[in-house]
Amino acid sequence: MVPALRHRERRHVRAVDPGLRQGDRRGPRVSTPAFALLGAGEFETWHDDIDRALLERSNGDGSVLISPAAAAPEGESIFDTWAGKGMAHYERLGIPARVSPLRTREDAERADVVAMLDEASLVFFSGGNPWYLATILLDTPFWARLQERLHDGLAYAGCSAGVACLTEMTYDSDAQDLDQVFKPGLGYVRNTLFAPHWDIVDDWVQGARA
């Protein structure tokens, strides 16, 4: 059982069947991209098996690229906290990992930042503001290369903002007015709106969880 979380903590999971076929020694050849859409509570023991399953079904060098970019607007200390949690999580599992320095749209244009996608087997986007994450990625070399790698066998895991950013419309979690919450996302997933934090859905529509 997953324990209850305090306000603003994150949890929950839904894993998508990757639809894979066996391939070469670097990993299986991927017929469709492999995704794990994790509601919240990233870098905890409850998704150890999900991490391993994604890596078994991916292509690359067996490493994880961690991106806390969605938390960048909260400041360096928060970014570093999520980066540190991610590194500690994968170190405990014996899985090599690196942290992407991606924080801004300018970073998403940098060749060295983009190149970090080339050999990784799994990219993990942790939580924060999904609209901010979408704005720094859309129509950049990083986003273009990420999509190429997904079709080449890179697995994708996202938690909270890392899930919600993928749709045509997403949430600006810093918006103060409910009328300003919904803003354009990456549009990778069509005709869908992800609500990763299902435990607070009643805050949006009373009785929705019933």
Image: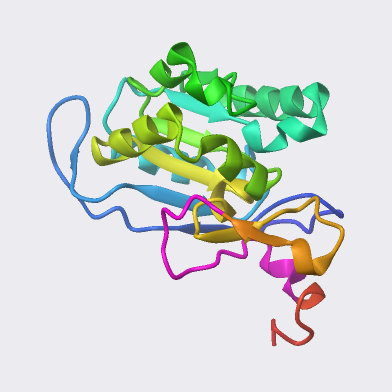
Q: Position of residue 189 (x, y in %)?
A: 42, 59
From this view, report whether residue 69 is shown above or below residue 117.
below
Residue shown at 74%/62% (left/top)?
181
Q: Position of residue 155 (x, y in %)?
A: 37, 39
Residue 108 is left or right of residue 207, and the answer is left
What's the magenta region? Answer: 185-201
From this view, report whether residue 154 is shown above or below residue 53.
above
Q: Quadrant of residue 122?
A: top left
Residue shown at 73%/27% (left/top)?
79
Rendered-image quadrant of the C terminus: bottom right
From this view, report whether residue 15 is shown above or below residue 106.
below
Residue 56 is left or right of residue 207, and the answer is left
Residue 156 or 134: which is nearer the viewer?
134
**Residue farthest along the top direction in this orientation:** 112
The answer, for residue 90, to whether it is visible in the render is no
Residue shown at 50%/60% (left/top)?
168
The answer, for residue 144, to whether it is visible in the render is yes
Q: Is residue 200 magenta?
A: yes
Magenta segment, prevailing SS (helix, strand or loop): loop
Q: Quadrant of residue 74?
A: top right
Q: Position of residue 92 (x, y in %)?
A: 57, 24
Q: Position of residue 63 (x, y in %)?
A: 41, 22
Residue shown at 56%/51% (left/top)?
165
Residue 114 or 87: which is nearer the viewer?
114
Residue 157 or 72: which is nearer the viewer?
72
